[in-house]
Amino acid sequence: MPHVFEIVAKDGAGRVGKLYTSHGIIETPAFVPVINPHLPVISIHDLKKLGFELFITNAYLIYKDEKLRELVLRKGIHDAFNWNKAIMTDSGAFQLMVYGDVEISNLEIVEFQSKIGVDIGVILDVPIYKGSIDYRKKFINETIRRAKEAYEAGYVTEDSRTIWVGPIHGVPYPSLLEYSVKNMTRYPFSMYAVGSIVPLMENYQLVQLIKSAVVVKSKLPTNYPVHLFGAGHPAMFALFVLVGFDTFDSAAYALYAKDNRYLTPYGTYHLRDLRYFPCDCPICTEYTPQELMKMDSMHRQHLLAMHNLYVAQAEIRRIRQAIYEGTLWQLVAKRASSHPEIARAYKWLLDKRNLKAYQFFEELEPVFKNKGLMITRDEERYLPVIRRYRERIIDRIFLWSDKVIISTPEGSNDLPTLIGAQVLILNSVFYVIPREIRHVYPLFQHMSPYSGIDPSALDFTERFIEYLREKGVKEIYVYDTREENAKKLAERLNIEEIYSGQDVGIISQEQEELFRAKAILRYQFGPGAEDIIEKVQIEYSPTTGRLRKIFAADVTKEEIEKVIIPEIEKHIEKREKLGKPIPSDPLQEMFIDKGKIWLLAAVTPMHFKLVPHPLLAYRMWQKFRDELRYMIIINEEAEPFVRAGRTVFSKFIVEVDKNIRANDEVFVLNEEKDLVAYGRAILSAREMMDFKRGAAVENRWGFKR
């Protein structure tokens, strides 16, 4: 079953997605409860009540039970279970792990899953939990052989109605994981899964698991949904989603209930230790811990299992919301406070020496998010969005003066706006912030507990000063409202002069606005983007006083003909449809009478991101089309639809700028490199090329041919 997955929203390597099955669409991330076909702790009715769209059961156990086998073969697994949504089955690998053997072959269990109509099936892989690398590789090779066997027998095919899962083994060895991924992706599985993690989960070896996840996700194409076998504690869900797992299954909800254990998103309680329930699910609002303890064991087990599943579902909803908001890292940080091993895993991901993890996340991490950063832990100063800024500012700073004042945050507010020296603000999180772009996400949109200037920020600033001198800066000053602080800072940065009102010149209001617009353009779109404007007018918000719109005051005759007149015509069409009055001379009234200025870009209040209008798109296209800077090429099939304003779908993309990240503003070209449209990137460059299903760019404007 090809191309079964699409991304709807992203944060970190986590994604809210749609998994298309023969029995409906599964919203991911999703927890998949394990249902024992012989001893179900909860009923199918309970699953429906809890809102599950998918469960997993064991095809091997069903096959071994003659009556149950005959029932599912006759009626199909969905009718047999009275379930009209998706069903996933495991193949008996767990029993193979426990008992060392199963009384069925790989092809027999694959054929059985196919016959009973499961939506998601798994080949009979061989779990491995111990032994040398060579020993483990033998078992990986056997799983690969079975994948080939299922493919050659005609089950694992691109047109199969079953989503076949390719198990990846080799945890915790990177070389084995890479070997497994390389060989399993030779076959047309629609989904992959990481297995053999039980020992790591039982011993809370989360760092090893997360390291393995980064290896697997770095090597797998991004368009496949990825499952994690045997991960069932809600405290860990956010961490697993952050590193890119889309679904995970477990029977922990039932096993814990059997042992009178009560799950929460931040840990586990034994029922006997609870005086009050810290939860408002239907179970916890109807009963007290004492009442549950007095019940017969079967009834208590059922109610505890229901509570555990309510908690799991609530955490999944919380994670999805965090992804939409762009706060998934913050949610994982909260969960990290609940267990030292989760904290260790989180810290490993953000270790400043961990270049592989950073590169993995940077490629997938959105550039702009819907909520600001709330930094509560030291390692979070190395969040991908923060490290990305420190990398980008080196060549994306717009230098407009040969004089620079390096100021503390307090001092920057004291320096005049029209001063003739460029002001760089020291910051413990971002290190150096040019004053012109201080409102751009995430520079303004963050909070942290740090008040002073971190030594790392000063080390970075020292190196940055050398870079400034290389770029032609001649005079560098240090400033703080308190002279003593300024002296200490100057000594630390090896700067001789403290700014105390020296004549560094002044600039006009028009220059300040132009420099600010150029600085934002260069930071958002890279070096050279500032050159597309030479004269602007700025519109400010009447409530906040911040920049809201940038108008070009240097419009050329060519731009009037190719951009402004077509844009006016499009606006007139909209007015006609709405029954609004039409100007007798639209160009005169909408352009000439307004001072011959035209809207280049609007600025979003939350992100301080430039949202291009047609004129800016045209200028960017003219300057950067040869290098495809922030550009996407689509095929001719999609072109007329995209010009008409339709969404850009991944399957029509033939080439992209590899530096595009989710939420970037991008420009869409045809194969002749003509400008077709512009819009907001939903996916990163890598994902745009991998995916063959779903939207890649939200179209803001289509250009008529």
Image: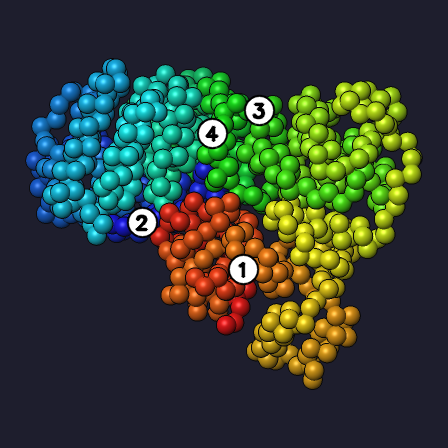
> Which residue in the structure is indicated by mark 1?
678
- The answer to which quarter of the image holds residue 211 is top left
Disc on the earlier residue, 4 or 1? 4
Pointers 4 and 1 in contact (C-beta within 8 Å) = no
Q: Is residue 27 visible?
A: no
> Which residue in the structure is indicated by mark 2?
4
Q: What amino acid is at disc 3?
A: Glu
Asked if 647 appears above or below 446 in the picture, the reply is below
Disc on the earlier residue, 2 or 4? 2
Colouring chosen for the image of the structure = rainbow
Residue 518: % across, % down: 70, 51
Q: Is residue 33 left or right of residue 653?
A: left
Q: CA distance from mark 4 to mark 1?
A: 31 Å
Q: What amino acid is at disc 2?
A: Val
Query: Which residue is depicted at the point 74% across and 70% down?
Result: 596
Q: Please, what secondary structure does the residue beneath circle 4 have? A: helix
Q: Which mark is in front, 3 or 1?
A: 1
Pointers 1 and 2 in contact (C-beta within 8 Å) = no
> Which residue in the structure is indicated by mark 4?
357
Residue 57: % across, % down: 23, 36
Most extreme residue toward the bottom is: 584
- The answer to which quarter of the image holds residue 139 is top left
Q: Please, what secondary structure does the residue beneath circle 1 have? A: strand
Q: CA distance from mark 3 to mark 1?
A: 37 Å
Residue 658: % across, % down: 47, 46
Q: Which mark is in front, 3 or 4?
A: 4
Question: Which of the labelled discs sits on residue 379, or is there none?
Answer: 3
Q: Please, what secondary structure does the residue beneath circle 3 have? A: helix
Q: CA distance from mark 2 to mark 3?
A: 36 Å
Q: Is residue 171 left or right of residue 124?
A: right
